[in-house]
Image (cartoon, rainbow, N blue to C red):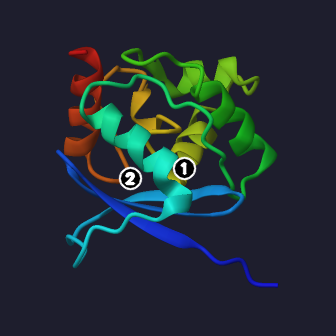
């Protein structure tokens, strides 16, 4: 049986976000380069889109009761679960995240997990930095990562 996914778009200060999910939860969030022809609001995704809007408006620091539904390896799940405990406005290095997720010495693998994160912002991969504490890479561009880090620091 095929699963039907719905899509919503929201405008943020750093571009349009596309949110996809189904009745089991949110499957993907991604920045899209072109503005959608219309801003869609799918009822199934309302809680997620509302919370993301509040985050970008500076009114939310954590995401509550959003069902997530995506595939991942056990390693990715453990790293992403650990990352979700890193508080708003704080950062960790890839090595530190490897250690707190029980995978000491796996900084490169943690970096790979960040690169394939299906739910940026909710799973806050922008909070992970290289060991030299520079901004580092971000799947959606370093300028967006820098904006997100500054947004959280200024709150």
| Residue sitting farthest toward the front | 43
Residue 60 in the image, given as x and y percentages of width and height: 38, 25
Residue 84 in the image, given as x and y percentages of width and height: 58, 27
User: What's the residue at 54%, 49% (across, down)?
Assistant: 117
Q: Mark 1: give few (<14), some (14-19) or many (20+) Cα within 10 Å.
A: many
Report the quarter where the N terminus lies.
bottom right
Asked whether 50 or 126 is in front, the reply is 50
Disc 1 marks which residue? 117
Asked if the residue under mark 2 is in contact with the one under mark 1, i.e. CB atoms within 8 Å, the reply is: yes
Report the quarter where the C terminus lies.
top left
Residue 16 in the image, given as x and y percentages of width and height: 26, 59
Q: Is mark 1 on a helix, strand or loop?
A: loop
Q: Is mark 2 on a helix, strand or loop?
A: loop
**Among the 4 quarters of the image, the one containing residue 85:** top right
User: What's the residue at 60%, 38% (across, down)?
Assistant: 110
Asked whether 41 or 115 is in front, the reply is 41
Q: Can residue 129 be seen from the camera position used here?
A: no
39 shown above or below 29: below
Disc 2 marks which residue? 139
Q: Mark 2: give few (<14), some (14-19) or many (20+) Cα within 10 Å.
A: some
User: What's the residue at 56%, 48% (across, down)?
Assistant: 112
| Residue sitting farthest toward the bottom | 1
**Among the 4 quarters of the image, the one containing residue 59:** top left
Residue 134 located left or right of residue 14:
right
């Amino acid at each position: 049986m095929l699963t039907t996914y719905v899509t919503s778009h929201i405008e943020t200060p750093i571009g349009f976000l596309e949110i996809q999910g189904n009745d089991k939860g949110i499957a993907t969030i991604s920045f899209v380069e072109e503005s959608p022809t219309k801003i869609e609001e799918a009822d199934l995704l309302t809680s997620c889109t509302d919370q993301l809007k509040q985050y970008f408006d500076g009114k939310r620091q954590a995401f509550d009761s959003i069902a997530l539904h995506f595939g991942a390896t056990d390693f990715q799940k453990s790293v992403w679960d650990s990352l979700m405990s890193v508080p708003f406005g704080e950062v960790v290095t890839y090595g530190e995240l490897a250690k707190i997720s029980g995978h000491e010495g796996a900084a490169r693998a943690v970096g790979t997990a960040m690169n394939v994160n299906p739910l940026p912002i909710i799973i806050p991969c922008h909070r992970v930095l290289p060991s030299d504490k520079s901004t580092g890479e971000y799947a959606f561009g370093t300028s967006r990562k820098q904006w997100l880090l500054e947004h959280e620091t200024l709150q």
